[in-house]
Amino acid sequence: MFDSLSDKLQVTLGDLRKRGRLDEEAISRAMREIRLALLEADVNFGVVKDFVGRVRGRAVGADVLRSLTPGQQVVKIVHEELTALMGSGDSKLAFAPRPPTVILLAGLQGSGKTTTAGKLALLLRKEGKAPGLVAADLQRPAAIDQLEQLGRQIQIPVYAQRESRDAVLAVREGLERARADGCDVVVVDTAGRLQIDEALMQELADVRDVARPTNVLLVLDAMTGQEAVAVAEAFQERVAFDGIVLTKLDGDARGGAALSVKAVTGKPIKLVSVGEKLDQLEYFHPDRMASRILGMGDVLSLIEKAEAAASEEEQEELERRMRTGEFTFDDFLTSYRMLRKMGPLKGVLSMVPGLGQQLQGLEVNERELARVEAIVLSMTPKERRLPHVIDGSRRLRIAKGSGTSVQQVNQLLGARKQMAKMMKEMGKGKLPALPGVAGKR
C-alpha cells in the first residue's frame, strides 16, 4: 500500500531538494504534482484541496524561501501535514477502571471483523491482558465457527450462544461468562451486512446498549478506498464509534482510505492489519506512516519488531557471535527466524532509512529464503555448527535432502563465509564499503 503515492511524492520532493533556492513558481509546480498524486491515490477531493492549501501556505512563507535548505524545509512541512492528516498523535485504546474492558467491533460484512477480533485478542494478550471473545454475529452461518477456530488457534476463550438468534442475549450471557472466568478485556464480534440498512444499525445499537463498551471500533477494508470513507460517514451518523481499524493495509490499495478517513470523520485510526497472520495487527502511528510514505524509513517500528522477535539476551548473544566471526548455520537459522517473525522482508527493509528508493522495482523472493532454510535444515547439527567439515559427499547429500542443487549449496556456503568475514571486520570497527553509499559515513 502507498507504493505508487510514495514513489510520486519522493520524486516531486526530490526535485525540490536539489534546488539551491525556491521561488513560488517551483512550489506551485510541486503542489500540482502532489495534488495529482493524492487524487490518483483515491484521497477524498476535499481533503486533497485542504491539504495542498495548507502545505502551499506554509511553503511560500519567508522562513522557507530564505532558508539555506528550502527543499528540505518543504519536505518537513509535507511530513508534518501528512501526519496531521492521519491524526497527529498516537491514539491508544481506552481501558475501564474496573474490568472487564469491552471492545465492540462494528462494520460491514466482508470487512474482516471476525479475523480482526482474533488478532486484537492476541495483541492484547501479548500486552499482559486476559482477553476473551464474544460471538455476536448470528447472521452469517459460519461466523461462530470461524471465531471458535480462531480462539483455538490462539488459545483464547470464545463465548458463543448457538441456541438463540438473539444477539443481545448472546452478548449479555457472553459477558457474564467472560467476567466469571476472569477476563479483563472482552472483544465482541458483531454482525455485518453487505450494505448499511436499518436492521443492521438497530441490532448494533441494541448490542452496544447491553455491552456498554469502553471502545467501539469501526473495521474498514482499506482496499475499498473512498467507499470505506463513505461507510465510515454512514456509521458515524447512526452509531458513535471511537476509532477505526483498517484491514488489508498490506494489499495493493492506493491509500485513499487511510489518508481521508480521519479528516472526513474526525475519528482516529487506532489499529491497522498489515498481513494475514494473526500476529499482524499493529497500533497505528501517523508520524511513522508519514515517514514511510516519504521514504524516510521507520526506525522506531523496526526496533519494536526486532524486540518482539527475540529476547534481549538472544539479540546480545547473536550480536556477540557475529562480531567475533562465529557465524554458524545455527546462528543463521536463529537470525532468519527472527526476521521472519518481523513480517514480510520487503516491508521490514522499507523501514530502514534510505532504502526506500533503492527497493523500487526490487522483488524480494521469500521462496528463495525458504529454499535456503531447507538447505540448512538438511545439514546435521555438527555440519551447522562446523561448516568447514562439509566436503563434496556431504554437499551432495544436503542438496538431495533439500531438493536443491550442489551449486546452490556451494553458493550458500560461500555466502556464509563472506558474511562471517564481514561481521568479523565490523566487530573490529572496519566498516565495509557499500555500493552507492561510499563516503556517506
Image (cartoon, helix red, strand yellow):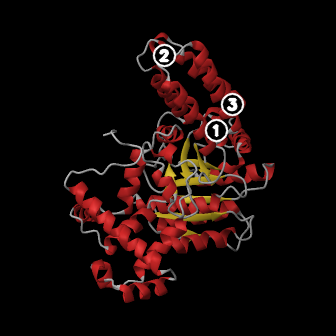
> 151 left or right of 135?
left
Q: CA distance from mark 2 to mark 3?
A: 24 Å
Which residue type does callout 2 highlight?
Arg
Q: Is residue 69 above or below residue 325?
A: above
Q: Is residue 131 above or below residue 273?
A: below
Q: CA distance from mark 1 to mark 3?
A: 19 Å
Residue 24 in picture, x, y percent from top left: 58, 13
Q: Earlier in the sequence, mark 1 or mark 3?
A: 3
Marking on residue 36: 3
Q: Earlier in the sequence, mark 2 or mark 3?
A: 2
Residue 431 in picture, x, y percent from top left: 27, 50
Which residue type does callout 3 highlight?
Leu
Q: Nearer the viewer, residue 141 or 154?
A: 154
> 319 left or right of 122?
left
The residue tagged with tag 2: helix, strand or loop? loop
- Residue on which disc 1 sits: 261
Marking on residue 275: none
Q: Nearer the viewer, residue 33 or 246?
A: 33
Q: Nearer the viewer, residue 432 or 151?
A: 432
The residue tagged with tag 3: helix, strand or loop? helix
The residue tagged with tag 1: helix, strand or loop? helix
> 121 left or right of 40?
left
- Residue on which disc 2 sits: 21
Q: Is residue 129 visible?
A: no
- Camera-side mark, 2 or 3: 2
Picture quadrant where residue 162 is located = bottom right
- Camera-side mark, 1 or 2: 2
Which residue type does callout 1 highlight?
Val
Residue for point 66% across, 54% down: 207
Residue for point 53% across, 54% down: 102
Residue 111 in picture, x, y percent from top left: 68, 55
